[in-house]
């Protein structure tokens, strides 16, 4: 079983080939390729490599499926005895990426 832990947008994701993940919005068009170079951990058939902080020579490539918005978050502000109430909503922009290949460059 081959998998890797990557960093995108300050968050860490455990990915395997064929996975679809939601990451913070990336400036891509649909079906455009993207390569993650910040790989923290790589495992292939029981052999594990851990980066300090990243592993040189390991890349994770994928393609953008679509840009979408996340779930709506309701934010309410309230001040007691001041008749102040304000409710707003927020939806985070996300990119859905399909992981195609986890590659290790052999020396």
Image: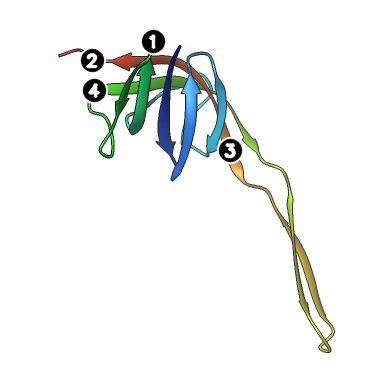
Marks 3 and 2: CB-CB under 8 Å? no
How far, Cα to Cα, is label 4 from label 1? 18 Å
> Residue 76 lies in what quarter of the image?
bottom right
Crowding at dot 2, Cα within 10 Å, few <14 / some 14-19 / many 20+, comes out as few
Residue furthest left as drawn: 107
Residue identified by numbered label 1: 45
Looking at the rendered structure, the secondary structure element under dot 4 is loop
Sequence-earlier tag: 3 or 1: 1
Mark 4 vs mark 3, foreground winner is 4
How far, Cα to Cα, is label 4 from label 3? 27 Å
Which disc is residue 94 wearing?
3
How far, Cα to Cα, is label 4 from label 2? 5 Å
How far, Cα to Cα, is label 3 from label 1? 32 Å
Q: Is residue 19 left or right of residue 52?
A: right
Residue identified by numbered label 4: 57
Looking at the picture, tell me which residue is in the foreground, 101 or 28: 101
Looking at the rendered structure, the secondary structure element under dot 1 is loop
Q: Is residue 88 above or below residue 41?
A: below
Q: Is residue 19 left or right of residue 56?
A: right
Sequence-earlier tag: 4 or 2: 4
Sequence-earlier tag: 4 or 1: 1
What residue do we see at 51% from left, 18% from top? 31
Looking at the rendered structure, the secondary structure element under dot 3 is strand
Mark 4 vs mark 1, foreground winner is 1
How far, Cα to Cα, is label 2 from label 1? 16 Å
Crowding at dot 3, Cα within 10 Å, few <14 / some 14-19 / many 20+, comes out as some
How far, Cα to Cα, is label 3 from label 2? 30 Å
Sequence-earlier tag: 2 or 1: 1
Residue furthest front as drawn: 46
């Amino acid at each position: 079983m081959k998998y890797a832990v990557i960093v995108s947008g300050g968050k860490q994701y455990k990915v395997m080939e064929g996975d679809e993940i939601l990451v913070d919005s990336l400036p891509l068009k649909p079906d455009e390729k993207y390569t993650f170079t910040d790989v923290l951990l790589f495992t292939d058939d029981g052999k594990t490599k851990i980066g300090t902080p990243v592993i040189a020579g390991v890349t994770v490539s994928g393609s953008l499926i679509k840009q979408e918005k996340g779930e709506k978050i309701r934010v309410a502000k309230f001040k007691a005895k001041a008749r102040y109430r304000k409710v707003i909503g927020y939806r985070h922009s996300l990119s859905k990426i399909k992981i195609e290949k986890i590659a290790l460059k052999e020396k």
